[in-house]
Image (tube, helix red, strand yellow):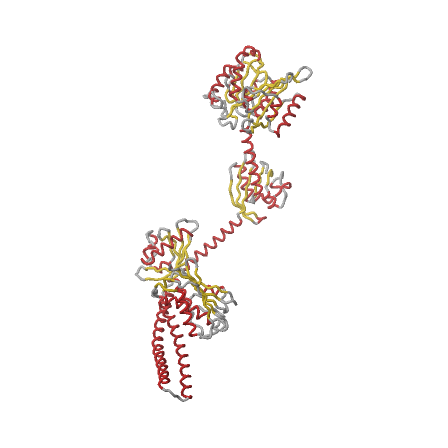
Amino acid sequence: MDNESSSSTRSLAEEVTANRGEQLVSLAQSAWDILWLLSPDGRMQDAGHWSVFTGQMEGEAATFGWLTALHPDDRAPFEIWLGAALHQGVRDEIECRLQKAHAAHSLVRLQLFPQMAADSSSITSWLVCGIELSQVQQHRVFGAEHYRLAMESSGVGLWDWDLVRNQLTWSAECKALFGLTPSAQVSYPSFLHLLHPEDRDAVNQAVAQTLEQQTEFNMNFRTIRPQDGSVHWMTSRGRGLYDMEGKPLRFMGVIYDITDQKRVQEENEATLYQASQLIETLPDTFVHLDKDWTYTYVNNAVEKLTGKPREQILGRSIFDLYPESVQQDFAIQYRKAMETRQPVVFEAYYPPGQRWYETRVYPDNDGGISVYSNNITEQKQVEEALQATETSFRRLIESNLIGIVRMRLDGILLDANQAFLSFIGYTQDDIASGTLHWRAFTPPADVQTTLQAIEDLKQHGSYKPYEKTYLTRDGRLVTALIAGVMLDNRKDEYIAYVVDLTAQKELEQQKDAFIGVVSHELRTPLTAIKGNIQLVRRQLRSIIRSQQQLPDKVYKIIESSEARIERALHQIEMQNRLINDLLDVSRIAANKLELAPQLCDLKQLTISSVEDVRATAVMRTIDLRLPDQESVLVLADPDRIGQVISNYLTNAIKYSDPKEPVTVGIDLESNHVRVWVEDHGPGLNEEAKKHVWDRFYQAKGIHVRSGSGAGLGLGLHICHTLIKRHGGDLGVDSTPGQGSTFWFALPFEM
């Protein structure tokens, strides 16, 4: 036998046993004169008794050679019958003349049994059994039982309708296929009742047409089992027996359950439909070319790309439609796939559409090719942009304007430019050693901050810029602004950008020192001036008290002098406030601003702060909106919180119309208390609200409406620091032209 046949060492009994069991083999060998095994497409798979019966050698019978043993007049109708039986996948029988060893052709009755796979999903082989008709009588006694067992093993049901008596007979296997017991009575109406309603009329008409036209009955239909209502697909074939006048006497046939085959067929059809729908909806082009380079299929994307309906493309050669493509990369690669019969993947530029495509070419079994092309123009543009970005980034690294360092998450430095290495005092040799860790140049105070930044990298892919102190190799402390981001193509590496702030920090320290010195030098003479003026005021008041009668002129001079003294003292207080702001800023910069928190009544503190401001702004209306409860307890530094309230209130008075009231209020919320100051001044735009808490910031276009001139822009910066140091929050709600509400919130002390 050839390579397509089963191994000769494997007997027919073993092959059939894998499909139907040993019982069928032994029965078949004892019940039939000849038997052999065919593959699903009709090739000789195991010769069995073939050579003994026909005298044809195994080599002659291989593949389809066994057909030559048929009588020449019977071969054509036999092949038609065999093809139909194999296609339908059901048992069938035929009478024909077959060559016999050392004798003329003998008339035999052949029966074809399908052998199913273990899961009943497909036919693995066909068992062909035959009896010489001259010996039919001899086998009558034993043949019926053998035949019954064979039918049970193959799952084929038999039916016989005696039309003269109108008596329908079903084998037990046939009844089982319909879900009936062996003792169940059947009739033609009951048969129709067991059919699916949608198939009932079609089957009835097909039976009537078969008997009327004396044709073969061959039909697939659905049945509904009465026990559970399950639907099963059946295929049935039958023939009628007629008298001399053509009147039907009997109608008999076979039936076979093809539910599993139908399910597989439907699944395959659904898969093919889904695949075709997917191909049609793809934004990428898909075509099929046969071995003559003719289009046999194009999808919607091809129509859109070419501007031609598929009717103008199908059936035409690619080189007739697009002669310019002969020399293009596409045609070269297509020929390669066509000649080598191997898949080809390539990228090429398509000039007519000015697009780049990634194309995959797959040869098929019929000599043609399927071509899938994906538009990668945007990807190419991104690659070019990335290349340009990489070039720019490399130039940035090499320019050494800022420090750039590549590190692993475990802390080892992998690469750095000269700007960073010079900043910390290390060299490329240190990096090349593979042991330089960020802890080597990080002072202990900054280790925890660095670890937190690395955690942010792991969770978010980057960390926000922050100031970090570095310990250089020679022991100096330098400051830098650092930011980091994970590398997209590496899960454990990141890039850090380092900006040297050392010079800036030195300038800030010098400025803070200058502020501290100037503040101290200013406060000393102001204190002396204030003391002298207060002394003069006390002396004037003492003169008034000691003298009962003073000339009107002298009294007026003293009264005028007291007014001037009060104004001078007010100006001194303003100067002291500015000096105190400068000192607070200096303490904040040096991280030396201290708080003295204690349990205090925020309601009473607010009232006191408002009264202090009222004493210096007697002409202004200040409204209070306070909660009804007697006290509002918070843990805070009362002097510093009073300073914040006074600053809010002083600014509200300074920048609003003198005729408009200023309102101070307290709101009690679930877990915190909120203090707010509302004015009817010019309001702040979005840009001003972003920077209003910055040091030395003064909003443009905002002018003083009452009181003394503008300050240094330090008050709100100090307020921000004080509230944050208390663990609170603060902000401003403002709309240009509608005034502002500055607020802060502190947690309750229950």
Picture coordinates of residue 228, whole percent (x, y): 54, 28
* Residue occupying the point 48% across, 54% down: 388
Q: Which of 205 and 639 is in front in this view?
A: 639
Q: Position of residue 614 (x, y in %)?
A: 43, 73
Which residue corresponds to the image point at 56% horizontal and 13% vertical from the top-left? 132
Q: In this picture, is 243 found above or below 387?
A: above
- Choose between 585 and 512: the one closer to the eye: 585
Image quadrant in which you'd find residue 137: top right
The residue under the point 44% across, 56% down is 393
Horizontal and vertical percent position of residue 161: 61, 19
Hey, which residue is sitting farthest top in the picture?
Answer: 138
Q: Tell me if residue 696 comes above or below residue 488 in the rendering.
A: below
| Quadrant the C terminus occupies | bottom left
> Which residue is at the front of the view, 144 or 122?
144
Q: Residue furthest right?
A: 245
Pick whichever, 530 or 223, lies toward us: 530
